[in-house]
Structures are given as C-alpha cells and as structure tokens.
Amino acid sequence: MEENLKTAAQNGDMNMLYTLLGEDPYVLDRIDDIPFVDTPLHVAACFGHVQGREGKTPLHYVVEQGDVDLLTEFLSACPQSIQDVTIQNETALYIAVKNDKVNALDFLLGGLRQACYQGSDIQERKIINWKDDEGNTVLHVATAMNQPKAVRLLLSSNIEVNVKNSMGLTALDISDPNNGQVRET
C-alpha cells in the first residue's frame, strides 16, 4: 500500500485520504491487489479509527454477535482493539455482558490473562476494572443484569470487587437484596 495512504489510515486522517483520492481517484480500485491485512480499512481499524454508531468498533460488533471464531481472528489481527471504548466508555467486556454473550466474555477474559508481553498484566487490570460513564465496572453491570455466569467469570479474573460506582455502590450493593448474591436463573 502506498505509504501516504497507510499513514492516513493509521492516523484516521480523512482530509489526507481525500487529498490522496483527489490526486489519484483510482488508488482504492487497486486495493484488491493488496493482501487482506494491509488495506486502508484494516489499518484504520487496527489503529482504532473505524467507529460506527455509538462509537462501536468492529470488535464491539463481533462481541455483540458472540461469534468467538471471528473474535479469535479479529483479535489476532488487531490485539490492541481490546482497549477500544464506545461513547458510553464501555469496553468489549461490557458489550459481552450487556448482550448476554458469556462465551465471548470468557474468551476476552482468557485472552487478557494469556497476553504475554511487557505491561500486559497492567493492561489486563486496567481493562477488567474499567469504569463506564456512570462509574460502573463490568462487574456492576453483570450484577445489575442478574448474570451469575458472567459474575463468576469476572470474580475469577483480576477484577476489584469493592469498587464503587458514581452512586457510591459496589457490585454487591446492587445484587439481590434478599441474599446479597446474584440470583441464579
């Protein structure tokens, strides 16, 4: 791929892209000759510049569908996309819980645990304990949505259980008031 096109995709620079298209209107027509992972769309997605409605990235849409095979391929090609957040400041973990995709949540947590690079343990704790716009962690959301399987998965990870949301509540505070636990369904 032309270096300028790649730079525009990496930086999410739409002005540069339109300038390049003005100089060579057929530059994108030649993309079919380029290997899959090097197209401007894939480069832009890998650098977090492809977001749709609600600020969702392709990773968020894959998690929403719960397609673990596609999720595997996507994260292999673009592992840093696990850090992408929506406009509500939600990670892919939130999307999995909100859509009751326990297999996707399990896969994402496993991938975070198995990451083997410098600083990966810090990234794991950061993503697992991420707070959305309301100050909720994904554990708050799983508890509020009465998802015991998701709660168990999260409790087996590095999640901090005593984190308070913007209303001063922990995940336990918002669980079933009758027994202090998430109800089994």
Image (spheres, rainbow, N blue to C red):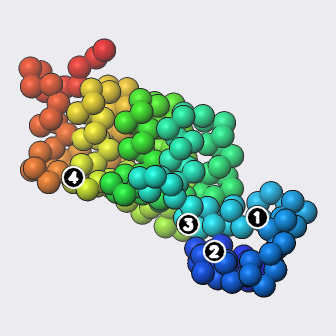
The disc label shown at residue 134, or none: 4
Among the two numbered marks 4 and 1 on one chain, the one whose residue lies closer to the N terminus: 1
Spatial separation of the CA atoms under disc 3 and disc 2: 8 Å
Does residue 74 appear in this view? yes
Q: Position of residue 52 (x, y in %)?
A: 51, 54
At label 4, the amino acid type is: Glu
Q: Is residue 41 left or right of residue 159?
A: right
State the residue at coordinates (57%, 51%): 58
Which of disc 4 and disc 3 is earlier in sequence? 3
Q: Secondary structure at mark 1?
A: loop
Q: Are marks 3 and 2 in contact (CB under 8 Å)?
A: yes
Give x and y (percent) for residue 65.
54, 34
The answer to whether residue 144 is left or right of residue 25 is left
Q: State which quarter of the image contains the N terminus.
A: bottom right
Question: Along the line of sight, which residue is nearer the eye, 87 or 19?
Answer: 19
Compared across the picture, whether 106 is left or right of 169 comes to right
Q: Dot 4 surroundings within 10 Å: few (below 14), some, or many (20 or more)?
A: few
The span from disc 3 to disc 1 (Cα, nearest Å) is 13 Å
SS category of the residue bearing label 4: loop
Instruction: Of the two numbered discs 3 and 2 on the same chain, state the one appearing first in sequence.
Output: 2
Q: Residue at x 52, y 40 (%)?
A: 63
Residue under pointer 3: 49
Residues under labels 4 and 2: Cα distance?
A: 31 Å
**Mark closer to the chain start, 3 or 1:** 1
